[in-house]
């Protein structure tokens, strides 16, 4: 009998949720950067082996919202828990339980499905500290198991998969076994471009950046012509995104082209534009316009 189910992945920003899921899938689908709010929407990532299918719900980092986009992100993260058969609660190797962590722990007290607490980034600490961290969390109520891992290096990830399998219900697969995400190619292409902007731009700029793929046309030879627009909130940011003599936008385009070609397994021509949409994160209509619904 096969097993299948939904696994909600929650935690503070930058604890390694998307890195872990890319590791499990063996393919980069969720974008990664060291900037908060890298993941803005729920993405279903699908892991299938011979007798198990796990539909992971990669969600935005849980933090107090400061605008309409932030409200959407928090609602998305909390809502995903209600859909789940298992919850993965990711923390890092911080040596104390901070206020954001306490808020998440309080939120999880009413959850009735198994909760697996995953301590990530153990490759950054001495081995002896791992048991201390596990001991710090052992008295948290409603936690079924504690699993230390390194999403970057892969340590403990196979054990985590086995533990998730143990908690999933029996049932048929939800998706064909060759599916890895519910998102369209167009969505992933836009996310790759946004990732390159996040990685390369100054600290104050990335939070106000969004990307719309305006067109994506496949040619007879299998290559793609792609046009996308990078939107920012402030006039002063437009020049930073373009860069002196176009150096920054060129760098973003080159790095995005490389990853998009790997993802599509095809050659592409990528054209990027930069436009201003002032204070779009504060306006619910614009948050929805950019696809955060």
Image: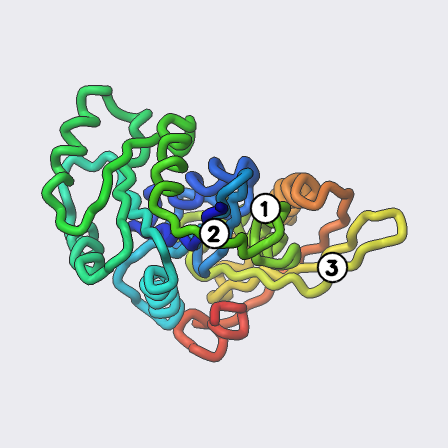
Q: Is residue 5 left or right of residue 98?
A: right
Q: CA distance from mark 1 to mark 3?
A: 23 Å
Residue labelled with disc 2: 55
- The extreme front residue here reads 1
Q: Quick check: can you spot residue 13?
A: yes
> Which mark's residue is nearer the viewer, 3 or 2?
2
Q: Do the CB atoms of the residues marked 1 and 2 lie less than 8 Å apart?
A: no
Q: CA distance from mark 1 to mark 2?
A: 37 Å
Q: Position of residue 164 (x, y in %)?
A: 37, 42
The numbered dot on residue 248 is 1
Q: Position of residue 53 (x, y in %)?
A: 50, 47
Q: Residue sitting at 30 percent across and 57 percent down?
A: 62
Q: Position of residue 287 (x, y in %)?
A: 47, 72
Q: Is residue 106 above or below residue 179?
A: below
The numbered dot on residue 128 is none
Label 2's element?
Answer: strand
Q: Residue sitting at 36 percent across and 50 percent down?
A: 9
- The extreme left residue here reads 139
Residue labelled with disc 3: 216
């Amino acid at each position: 009998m096969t097993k299948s189910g939904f696994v909600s992945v929650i935690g503070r920003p930058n604890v390694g949720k998307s890195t872990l899921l890319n590791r499990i899938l063996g393919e980069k689908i969720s974008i990664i950067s060291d900037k908060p709010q890298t993941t803005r929407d729920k993405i279903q990532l699908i892991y299938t082996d011979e007798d198990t299918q796990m539909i992971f719900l990669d969600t935005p980092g849980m933090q107090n919202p400061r605008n309409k986009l932030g409200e959407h992100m928090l609602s998305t993260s909390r809502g995903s828990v209600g859909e789940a058969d298992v919850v993965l609660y990711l923390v890092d190797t911080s040596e104390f339980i901070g206020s954001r962590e306490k808020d998440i722990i309080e939120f999880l007290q009413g959850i009735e499905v198994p909760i697996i607490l995953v301590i990530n980034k153990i490759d950054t600490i001495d081995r002896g500290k791992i048991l201390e961290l596990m001991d710090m969390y052992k008295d948290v109520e409603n936690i079924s198991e504690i699993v230390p891992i390194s999403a970057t290096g892969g340590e403990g990830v196979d054990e985590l998969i086995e533990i998730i399998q143990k908690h999933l219900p029996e049932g048929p697969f939800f998706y064909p076994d060759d599916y890895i995400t519910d998102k369209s190619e167009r969505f992933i292409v836009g996310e790759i471009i946004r990732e390159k902007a996040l990685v390369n731009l100054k600290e104050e700029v990335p939070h106000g950046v969004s990307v719309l793929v305006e067109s994506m046309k496949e040619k007879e030879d299998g290559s793609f012509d792609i046009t996308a627009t990078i939107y920012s909130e402030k006039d002063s940011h437009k020049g930073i995104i373009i860069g002196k003599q176009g150096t920054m936008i060129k760098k973003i385009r080159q790095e995005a082209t490389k990853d998009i070609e790997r993802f599509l397994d095809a050659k592409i021509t990528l054209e990027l534009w930069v436009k201003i949409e002032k204070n779009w994160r504060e306006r619910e209509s614009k948050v929805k316009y950019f696809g955060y619904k």
